[in-house]
Image (cartoon, helix red, strand yellow):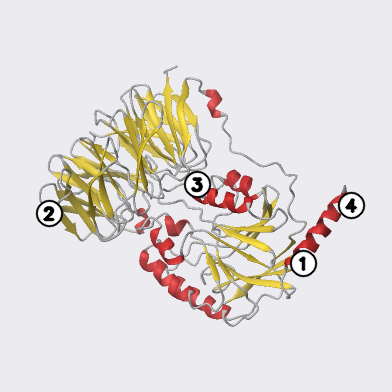
Amino acid sequence: MKRFFLTLAALFCAAWSWAASASDTLTFAYISDTHVGSGSGATDLEACVADMNTLPEIRFVIHAGDVTEFGADSELELTKSIMDHLKMPYYIVPGNHDVKWSESGGNTFNRLWGRSVFTFDADGIRFIGTDSGPNMRMGMAQVPRESLVWMDSLVRATPKDMPIVYITHNPVEKSLSNWDHVYDILKQGNLVLTMGGHWHTNNFKTYDGIPAVIGRSSLASTPKFGGAGYNLVRIDTRTGDVAIYNRQAGGPTAEKPWCTFNLFTAADRSVPQSRPDYSINQQYPNVEVVWQFQDKADIGAGFATDGRRIFYATAPGVIKAVEAKNGKPVWEFPTGGRIYSFPYYADGRVVCASTDGNVYCLDAKKGKELWRYRTEKGIVACPLVHQDVVYIGSSCGKFYAIDLRTGREKWTYEGIKGFIEARPCADDRKVYIGSWGNEFYAFDLKTGALVWKWQNGGSRMYSAAANFPVEAYGKIFITTPERATRALDRETGHEIWFSKAPNGRESQGLSLDGKTLYVKTMLTNELVGVDTQADTCLIRWRCPLPNDADMDLAPAEILSNGNAIFVPSSVGKVYAVAADGSRVLWARKLSNTVINHILPLSEDTVVVSTMDGIVACLKYTDR
């Protein structure tokens, strides 16, 4: 057996040497986590680029993501202007910082660099890079469904013995929610190495038998490296020996490599492929799947329904309708951008926005466009229809009121700090929304005049922006990423109470009678019921959830049909909790990615979507 494997290695080596260039060493630069837009990010990247240009041995550069700090258009454009000074080709993928807080929903990255994936060949090695999210919705990293489909077709077309090196920002292990799907595709070919970043340090691991290199951040402030820098990767094309060196911007290159291994022998294909655990589905036989389908693309938002049809949108930008009773397609409408906007149904019309900058109003029966309203930038926000008016924010610093019937503007507020992502809430006189500029606003419904503005100090990442606000008993409730829940006076914006006791991140909802605020905890796997009538944070109950995740980051709203409360998770699980919070009625795991939305259709039926494109209708009984 040993002789057999040695023979295979020899044949592989010979085949690869035949494909290699005249040089015996392939050298490339490997940079990650540049975080342009924070601290010294831009100047550190400039120093690295200038240094790379002094080294003629570098054939190309790979950037493994977290290109920017906040994914802002200005940060991405600055990064490209710096990277374009390289004298050699470079290949780049986005990281979580580039797409989670993206004002363009990822459109700007694709506009600047063509797309979020790449492939090229060098010295007989095929390099494949993909994005790994999470796109707009907080949760574990996830290679988008459409990127998996693209990669699958590419690997199938790759010669079986051709070495494949895979690059994505997050290491390909269990913190990447669909790591198993990634390996299923790549192991169809000759996967020899994965490369990533995210950890801001140099590390070598083996996951599912495949060697994994995790690279340092370029930031000078990164502990232990002592200055801005990157890695030099050297591959001996005769032997397959790999050596990776830390390189300080301006020199020198470390005398000794921090990592060495051999591409021919490092991978162990006898290691069984690890999988997510779906055993919870056997614990709750009182819930069943009525119908389910897998879309060919990611889904980055929730649903609307008219009772007969269910409306949703794919992340690549197609609005769709399916039959509520069987999930069969009815119509679809393509837009010119990506979609992370929840559709909204009102009076025979479906309203949804796209990162192409348009708010669309479609006929619910046929999907025909009735009108579109053009804004100045892409839209990742969700519309609210209230009293025949569409209320929605954009990424251009504006908030709009648009007539549902005609598509004509009723008023516009200019002066939003940051961009808007969430859906507003409204009462009989005001509409309320937060932005990624650490501000929360109340506008007059009729005139658009600013009534009050609340500001959250500290990092903009703590903004009340992904959270869907709710109103009850004269209060506006918001839950923000520093794991704080607040009640604001709806008349003045003054803080009535602030508490970290619910320990929620962004996911919240309101009972049908308005008396209970639901908050999903981030760290303790609980659903918390908070009294909305009290002038302090009065927790009425806590219900433990059968969640095995270390933390749950999914921001989706929590809805109820009066009999049960439906709780989303970031690991593909749906929970139904008794209306009084006393117990879990059932749970179902559909995927290992973020649950976007759980929409009640009746007293015993819900429809659910996952970030990786699964749409399912579930029916249950109270056991």
- Which residue lies under the disc numbered 1? 17
Do we see residue 557 in this rendering?
no
Q: Amino acid at mark 2?
A: Ala
Q: Position of residue 178 (x, y in %)?
A: 55, 45
Question: Up-down: is 326 above or below 183?
Answer: above
Q: Amino acid at mark 3?
A: Arg
The answer to the question of whether label 1 and label 2 lie on touching residues, with beta carbons closer than 8 A, is no
Q: What element does badge 3 sit on?
A: helix
Q: Earlier in the sequence, mark 4 or mark 3?
A: 4
State the residue at coordinates (65%, 41%): 274
Alpha carbon distance from label 4 to label 2: 80 Å
- Which residue lies under the disc numbered 2? 449
The answer to the question of whether label 3 and label 1 lie on touching residues, with beta carbons closer than 8 A, is no
Q: Earlier in the sequence, mark 3 or mark 1?
A: 1
Q: Quadrant of residue 489?
A: top left
Q: Amino acid at mark 1?
A: Ser
Q: Nearer the viewer, mark 1 or mark 2?
A: 1
- Which residue lies under the disc numbered 3? 145
Instruction: Tell which of 35 and 269 is nearer to you.
Output: 269
The answer to the question of whether label 4 and label 2 lie on touching residues, with beta carbons closer than 8 A, is no
Q: Position of residue 458 (x, y in %)?
A: 34, 59
